[in-house]
Amino acid sequence: MKQKRFLMVCLGNICRSPLAEGILKHKAAAAGLDWVVESAGTNGYHTGEAPHPLSQKVARLNGVDICQQRARNFTAADLERYDHIYAMAADVITDMKRIAGKQWDPSKVDLLLNEVEAGSNQDVPDPWYGEEPGYHDVYKLIDSACDAIIMRFAQVKSQK
Ligand code: 4NP
């Protein structure tokens, strides 16, 4: 089976997209899939930083270790390097278009939550300004989207 390459993108690459990277990586490995899953941010404010302590905590409580991740900037070259690029929210897509310029390829990019409900165009809310419960809510949303990605691209058949 061909290796698939996924990129998860948010603003800071410290709250939402590190969770998305960690969760999808974890599920892909559990399903025996040879997938590359990485993440990036569009605002560059936190480049080189580890994920937010609350993202790390919520991931750990769910058996997912994201503490080794470090924030990096989304670049135009990412449009070529990945097969599927998921933005956590509409403002992230606006930034990605600006950064990508001529490399922009809408066929590779979608909002993450459109994997849960196609065409719903919902954002994963930014937990950065809030408290711990917001991070748990974000985890659940991203977790269900990652289940949908596994079902779609791994062609896993549901167990009856
Ligand atoms: P994220 O959250 O995009 O989910 O990583 C944010 C983290 C930091 C900032 C904004 C959003 N910030 O403006 O510093």
Image (cartoon, grey):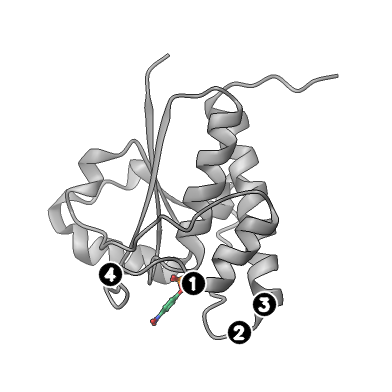
Question: Residue 47, position in %: x, y?
Answer: 27, 69
Question: Mark 3 Cα within 10 Å, few/some/many (few <14, many 20+)?
Answer: some
Name the one closer to the observer, 36 or 100.
36
Q: Identify residue type, mark 3.
A: Glu
Q: Is residue 105 left or right of residue 147?
A: left
- Rounded to the nearest angstrom, the CA distance separating label 1 from label 2 is 12 Å
Name the one closer to the observer, 139 or 84.
139
Specify which label sits upstream in the sequence, 4 or 3: 4
Q: Secondary structure beneath disc 2?
A: loop
| Residue placed under numbered mark 3 in the picture | 132
Specify which label sits upstream in the sequence, 4 or 2: 4
| Residue placed under numbered mark 2 in the picture | 130
- Rounded to the nearest angstrom, the CA distance separating label 4 from label 2 is 21 Å
Question: Residue 129, position in %: x, y?
Answer: 54, 86
Which residue, as the protein is rendered here, is positioned at the far left? 102
Total labels: the figure holds 4
Q: Identify residue type, mark 1.
A: His
Q: Residue at x 55, y 24 (%)?
A: 154
Question: Mark 2 Cα within 10 Å, few/some/many (few <14, many 20+)?
Answer: few
Disc number placed over residue 92 in the picture, else none: none
Q: Residue at x 43, y 68 (%)?
A: 14
Ligand 1 within 8 A of label 1's CB? yes
- Rounded to the nearest angstrom, the CA distance separating label 3 from label 2 is 7 Å
> In the rendered image, is residue 128 in sight?
yes
Q: Identify residue type, mark 4.
A: Thr
Q: Is residue 12 left or right of residue 138?
A: left
| Residue placed under numbered mark 1 in the picture | 52
